[in-house]
């Protein structure tokens, strides 16, 4: 990572110096007269944007492939299955069970286990559906041993991380708000779930398609995955059409863009700290992790697609953080199991993001949301919601979702059912004049994130739905 001017992590976790005054209520004209490829209007960049609340910036940090129980099974202390209704602290969320349905005890998910070359659990759609077993959550260890010819149920799926390893995430939850009913929107692999951050609905199954974005030759070299473009409107298109700036900050993007490889031999050399040592994932930027690279209207667009190391801290220091910012670390900082990827490297990355925000001029106007794209095939004990009636796709397991910043209730546990489309809904509500559901997907039906937020700090009550 680039050297960041940082505060101690505790200060970043609190980000508690109080929000700015209530934002201007109202919105630009909501008439959708421009398509995704129309000329870009003049964009507001922060405090000049009209918002429904005092939240002037939201930063969405996306990590990978861990369930709620992986990281919070031992943070929460309520009896498993007790469904607590209180909201203050660890006593108000369920601990993970000591054993799962087969009687197996959890394995230790530490850096050694997570980084094992072949320790990426099966998390394809058919395997996850089999493991969830219509909500019984009883086929993660036994009962679906082979699915589509690949090992599915295994004792390695039932895994809890040591408190000492994920303590910074526990500290974040105590300083801010934790959701214990936030689910991956699709039972399956990362790319399909990432699409809900952009479209708030199903686009394709699992990792069915690769991206035509810069660097695709590096992540797909030698693979037969079909590359695909889509032209439906995304939340990015809506923001730009309404004059609101946004950016995706990706680790390793500048190196890939500078190389602009047309063959695998031209891919950037792995950074020294990426011990897997390949000119590919997880040591290089991967466009398949960025849903907006599947859309020509947003793919590799200057000002929207940025490099994390070169641009994020610089934009913060200059007071140029866009109203909506997504942050995704380079592969070896995402916590994705396998390929020498450690959990501690991901924790350090997230700490760096939060510390940089806490040290910036934007600290008093920024809401930070930290989540994981999907559960990676790991066990979780809470049954997901019924299949979505919007796109007829089944929900997957819970993933952690933590809110941090001056607008957030402290030491709060939210039991409101949410998913990635809830973030899209909040963006629509706050920056697009309170009109949600503009993508005609799950954003019209899922709950908003209002339960996380303190009306006294946001200047108004952010809706729960």
Image (cartoon, grey):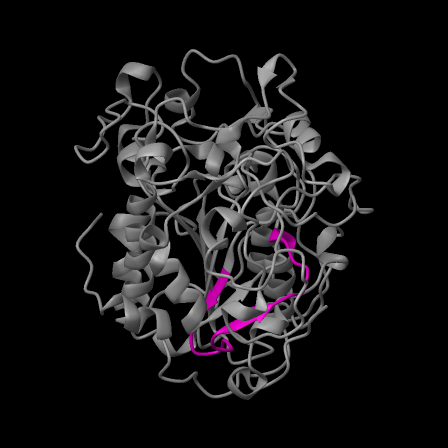
Locate the C terminus by quadrant. Answer: bottom right
Can I make out residue 285 in this image?
A: no
Residue drawn at (65%, 29%) of the image: 125
Residue 225 position within the rendered picture, expressed as x and y whole percent measured from the top left: 54, 17
| Magenta stretch: helix, strand or loop mostly | loop
Can I make out residue 343 in this image?
A: yes
Residue 92 occupies quadrant: bottom right
Residue 420 sits inside the magenta stretch? yes
Q: Which residue is at the far front?
A: 103
Above or below 420: residue 179? below
Left or right: 88 in relation to 429 = left
Residue 448 sits inside the magenta stretch? no
Above or below 409: residue 180? above
**Camera-nearest residue between 112 and 49:** 112
Residue 280 position within the rendered picture, expressed as x and y whole percent measured from the top left: 33, 24
Left or right: 361 in relation to 144 = left
Residue 43 position within the rendered picture, expressed as x and y whole percent measured from the top left: 49, 64
Residue 45 occupies quadrant: bottom left
Residue 47 position within the rendered picture, expressed as x and y whole percent measured from the top left: 44, 77
Q: What is the span of residues highlighted in magenta in the rendered image?
A: 402-421
Above or below 8: residue 99? above
Q: Which residue is at the far right?
A: 389
């Amino acid at each position: 990572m680039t050297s960041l001017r940082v505060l101690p992590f505790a200060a970043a976790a609190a980000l508690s110096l109080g929000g700015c005054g209530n934002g201007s209520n109202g919105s630009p004209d909501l008439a959708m007269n421009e398509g995704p490829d129309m000329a870009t209007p003049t964009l507001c960049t922060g405090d000049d944007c009209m918002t429904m609340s005092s939240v002037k910036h939201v930063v969405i940090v996306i990590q990978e492939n861990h369930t709620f129980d992986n990281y919070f099974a031992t943070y929460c202390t309520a009896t498993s299955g007790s469904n607590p209704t209180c909201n203050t602290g660890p006593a108000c969320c369920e601990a993970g069970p000591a054993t799962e349905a087969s009687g197996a005890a959890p394995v230790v998910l530490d850096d050694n286990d997570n980084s094992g070359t072949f320790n990426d659990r099966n998390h394809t759609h058919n395997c996850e559906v089999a493991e969830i077993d219509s909500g019984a959550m009883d086929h993660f260890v036994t009962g679906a041993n082979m699915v589509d010819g690949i090992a599915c149920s295994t004792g390695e799926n039932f895994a809890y991380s040591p408190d000492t390893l994920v303590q910074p995430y526990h500290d974040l939850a105590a300083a801010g708000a934790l959701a214990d009913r936030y689910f991956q929107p699709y039972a399956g692999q990362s790319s399909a779930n990432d699409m809900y951050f952009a479209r708030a609905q199903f686009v394709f199954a699992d990792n069915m398609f690769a991206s035509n974005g810069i660097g695709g030759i590096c992540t797909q070299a030698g693979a037969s995955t079909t590359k695909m473009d889509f032209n439906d409107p995304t939340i990015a298109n809506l923001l730009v059409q309404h004059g609101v700036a946004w950016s995706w900050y990706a680790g390793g993007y500048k190196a890939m863009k500078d190389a602009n490889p047309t063959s695998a031999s031209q891919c950037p050399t792995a950074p020294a700290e990426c011990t897997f040592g390949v000119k590919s994932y997880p040591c290089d930027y991967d466009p398949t992790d960025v849903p907006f690279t599947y859309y020509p209207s947003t793919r590799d667009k200057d000002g929207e697609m940025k490099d994390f190391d070169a641009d994020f801290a610089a934009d913060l220091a200059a007071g140029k953080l866009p109203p909506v910012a997504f942050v995704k670390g380079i592969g070896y900082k995402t916590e994705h199991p396998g390929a020498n990827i450690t959990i501690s490297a991901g924790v350090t990355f997230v700490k760096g993001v939060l510390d940089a925000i806490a040290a910036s001029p934007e600290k008093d106007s920024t809401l930070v949301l930290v989540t994981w794209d999907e559960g990676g095939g790991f066990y979780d004990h809470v049954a997901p919601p019924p299949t979505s009636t919007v796109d007829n796709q089944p929900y997957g397991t819970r993933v952690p979702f933590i809110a941090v910043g001056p607008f957030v209730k402290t030491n709060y546990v939210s039991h409101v059912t949410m998913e990635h489309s809830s973030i899209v809904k909040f963006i629509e509500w706050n920056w697009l004049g309170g009109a949600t559901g503009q993508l005609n997907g799950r954003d019209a039906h899922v709950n908003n994130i209002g339960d996380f937020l303190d009306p006294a700090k946001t200047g108004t009550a952010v809706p729960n739905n």
